[in-house]
Amino acid sequence: MQFVNSTKIITVVKADDLPQLQEAGAIVRQGGLVAFPTETVYGLGGNAL
C-alpha cells in the first residue's frame, strides 16, 4: 500500500461558505480526514464506513 502525505488548508469563515464546505466534504468522501477547531480542542472528521 502506498501512502501519500498531503495537507491542504481550507478556511471556512462563515457557515454559508459553500465551496469550501463542499471541498471538505469531498475530502471525507474520498477517505481523507478533516481537522477543525472547537472551543476547547481540535476535532477530527472522517468517514467511518
Image (spheres, rainbow, N blue to C red):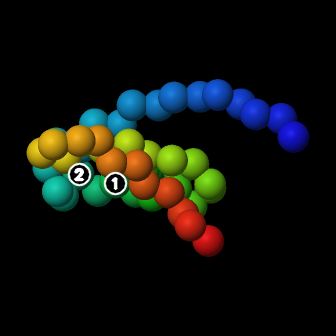
In this view, the residue farthest toward the right is 1
* Image side of residue 44 versus residue 49, left or right: left
Residue for point 57% across, 48% down: 32
| Label 1 to label 2: alpha-carbon separation | 6 Å
* Image side of residue 6 versus residue 37, left or right: right
Residue 3 picture location, percent across and down:
76, 34
Picture quarter with the N terminus? top right
Picture quarter with the C terminus? bottom right
Residue for point 64% across, 28% down: 5
Any part of residue 20 in sight: no
Any part of residue 7 in sight: yes
Tell me: residue 37, above or below residue 31. Answer: above
Q: Nearer the viewer, residue 7 or 45?
A: 45
Residue 27 picture location, percent across and down:
53, 50
Label 1 SS: helix
Q: The disc labelled 1 sits on which kind of residue?
A: Leu
Q: Which residue is mark 1?
A: 21
- Crowding at dot 1, Cα within 10 Å, few <14 / some 14-19 / many 20+, comes out as some
Q: The disc labelled 2 sits on which kind of residue?
A: Asp
Query: Mark 2 and mark 1 in contact (Cβ < 8 Å)?
Result: yes
Residue for point 83% across, 35% down: 2
Q: Which mark is residue 17?
A: 2
Q: Quadrant of residue 25?
A: bottom left
Tell me: residue 9, above or below residue 13. Answer: above
Residue 42 picture location, percent across and down:
29, 41
Residue 18 picture location, percent across and down:
29, 56
Residue for point 54% across, 63% down: 47
